[in-house]
Image (tube, grey):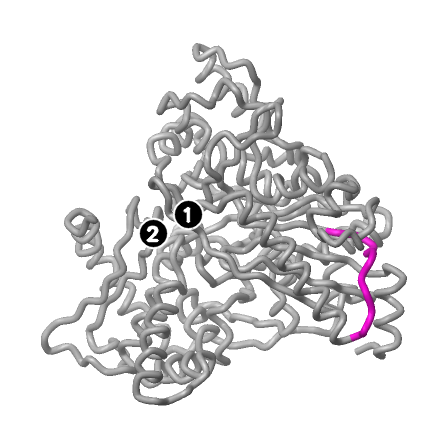
């Protein structure tokens, strides 16, 4: 830990990096400084997606109001801690939820509502492109959204000038540059393993597929250019500076690193960009990233193929639903506590309930739950209905209830990981965990270790999450040595001496999760019936 005077000096001189991440529920800003990118201050703004006209979305006003509010919160934290004003930084990075669809016309107008990763309305397009490319194209990928719009004969298609992601959009508005990081780009269109650019043969196949439509654009002209970690990606314009800081104190001209998706920044924040390492991010959604030694032997619709921020292949198992349903149950318990006059902090209720799950029966009393607030592609559901199910003679205890909900938050992910680890034989030596599921010590971490049967590590520094990860990437661009690899930079500078808190799989929990997983898979027709019959 550096002295306060040293930290003040770093802030005043601009020897820092600013990371901004647009997460599912929070827009977070983190200022870092020093050789290990130590977090100096942070700020955040809560936001929430909307379900409007059948689309999970955020408005552009939400984006810019949230960015300004998150940055203002950071400024307040700096003022409180150091009594200085922030006017410049050494570099900036922007990260956001991966995938989705943001098409713009030549005037910069958004042509459709922003479609987030949460939408599962592109099944026909994803299936056709997967068959055409012999490569899994998930429903969340931007190309799936674009092709679904073509299948649906949407009117906006002839006016498209640019298609990008949320991270790419924000970066474009801040710098004027139509680029994105290669990790984020891999959620737009497949990346070729040799060139680490958009796959040219697949692009040609797509062009042939839609040639009769006679659109006035080619795919290469409307997608952002992929850039690699460490490359320069433009500078903050005066207009961009005002978007971040409407007060006008933030100076223009600050260099920006390539924007990245939350998958890439999660890998960076957990030091898991080398082969045989992986990480699990567990919050509103949950996804596991495993860096591959070689390409997978078969195409699996449950497994996405993306890349690290420096372009190496990664297998990604992604589930749309994780902690949202648990959060609502905890809110119900909090409401009850308030009703009986008990003023218990929400964080304490989480801890009490999570710890209670450790006391559950090995078979969870026969209880079953599905946390599907939205559809779940891994299990083949385009919509979701949160469900809790039990037999009349089930052992209905608080411990069994809570472990059921914690296990179900990871159950869809396990379906995907079983394919990766068992069917494909991918080797993983360690998994790093980060996200809200792991806040209560020893619970979420232990249950994840049971689900994957691999040691799980938590790093204290990873608590800042993707905003810290993109700040590290901004620092890497600014200070890396010539030809220095990202993995070396992370291990030798950022995480040197930090091994993380390790938790081995508990054999009893492994058995417990296996029993629940079988019940979960057998019970999926119950969830399917709920989707069919429970309608507004």
Residue 333 position, x and y percent, is 33, 78
- Mark carried by residue 452: none
Q: Secondary structure at mark 1?
A: loop
Answer above or below: position of 270 versus 187.
below
Toward the left, the furthest residue is 392
Answer above or below: position of 532 versus 509.
above
Residue 363 position, x and y percent, is 24, 76
Choose top left, top right, bottom left or bottom right for residue 192. top right
Category of crowding for the residue at label 2, using alpha-carbon neighbours closer than 10 angstroms: few (below 14), some (14–19), many (at least 20) = some
Q: Secondary structure at mark 2?
A: loop
Q: Which residue is mark 2?
A: 374
**Residue at screen point 31% across, 68% down:** 514
Label whose residue precedes the other's in the sequence (1 or 2): 1
Toward the bottom, the furthest residue is 341
Q: Which residue is mark 1?
A: 118
Residue 18 position, x and y percent, is 74, 57
Give the main secondary structure, helix, strand or loop, of the magenta stretch. loop
- Label 1 with label 2: CB-CB less than 8 Å: yes
Q: Looking at the image, which is closer to me, 128 or 19?
A: 19
**Residue at screen point 56% across, 52% down:** 263
Residue 36 position, x and y percent, is 78, 67
Give the extent of the magenta segment. 82-92
**Residue at screen point 51% across, 75% down:** 439
């Amino acid at each position: 830990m550096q002295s306060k005077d040293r930290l003040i000096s770093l802030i005043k001189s601009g020897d820092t990096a600013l990371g901004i991440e647009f997460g599912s529920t929070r827009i977070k800003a983190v200022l870092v400084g020093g050789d290990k990118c130590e977090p100096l201050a942070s700020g955040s703004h809560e936001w929430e997606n909307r379900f409007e006209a059948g689309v999970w979305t955020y408005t552009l006003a939400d984006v810019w109001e949230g960015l300004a509010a998150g940055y203002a919160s950071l400024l307040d934290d700096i003022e409180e801690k150091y009594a200085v004003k922030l006017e410049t930084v050494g570099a900036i990075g922007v990260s956001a939820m991966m995938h989705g669809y943001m098409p713009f016309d030549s005037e910069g107008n958004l042509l459709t509502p922003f479609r987030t990763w949460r939408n599962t309305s592109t099944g026909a397009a994803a299936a056709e492109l997967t068959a055409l490319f012999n490569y899994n194209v998930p429903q969340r990928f931007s190309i799936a959204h674009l092709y679904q719009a073509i299948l649906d004969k949407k009117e906006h298609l002839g006016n498209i000038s640019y298609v990008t992601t949320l991270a790419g959009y924000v970066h474009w508005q801040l710098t004027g540059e139509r680029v994105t990081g290669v990790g984020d780009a891999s959620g737009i269109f497949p990346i070729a393993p040799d060139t680490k650019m958009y796959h040219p043969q697949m692009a040609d196949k797509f062009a042939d597929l839609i040639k009769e439509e006679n659109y006035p654009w080619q795919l290469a002209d409307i997608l952002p250019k992929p850039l690699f970690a460490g490359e320069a990606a433009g500078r903050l314009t005066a207009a961009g500076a005002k978007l971040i800081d409407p007060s006008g104190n933030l100076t223009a001209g600050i260099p920006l690193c390539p924007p990245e998706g939350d998958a890439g920044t999660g890998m960076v924040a957990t030091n898991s960009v080398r082969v045989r390492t992986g990480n699990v991010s567990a919050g509103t959604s949950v996804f596991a990233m495993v860096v591959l030694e070689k390409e997978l032997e078969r195409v699996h619709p449950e497994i996405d193929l993306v890349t690290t921020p420096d372009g190496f292949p990664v297998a990604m198992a992604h589930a749309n639903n994780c902690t949202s349903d648990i959060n609502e149950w905890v809110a119900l318990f909090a409401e009850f506590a308030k009703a009986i006059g008990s003023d218990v902090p929400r964080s304490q209720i989480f801890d009490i309930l999570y710890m209670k799950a450790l006391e559950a029966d090995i078979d969870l009393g026969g209880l079953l739950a599905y946390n599907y607030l939205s559809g779940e592609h891994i299990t083949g559901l385009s919509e979701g209905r949160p469900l809790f199910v039990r037999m009349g003679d089930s052992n209905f205890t608080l411990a069994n209830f809570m472990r059921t909900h914690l296990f179900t938050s990871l159950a869809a992910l396990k379906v995907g990981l079983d394919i990766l680890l068992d069917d494909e034989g991918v080797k993983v030596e360690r998994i790093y965990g980060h996200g809200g599921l792991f806040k209560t010590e020893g619970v979420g971490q232990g249950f994840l270790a049971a689900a994957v049967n691999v040691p799980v590590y938590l790093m204290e520094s990873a608590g800042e999450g993707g905003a810290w990860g993109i700040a590290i990437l901004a620092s890497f661009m600014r200070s890396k040595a010539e030809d220095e690899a990202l993995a070396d930079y992370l291990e030798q500078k950022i995480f040197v001496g930090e091994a993380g808190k390790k938790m081995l799989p508990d054999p009893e929990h492994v058995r417990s999760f296996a029993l629940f997983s079988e019940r979960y898979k057998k019970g999926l027709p119950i969830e399917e019936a709920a989707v069919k019959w429970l309608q507004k």
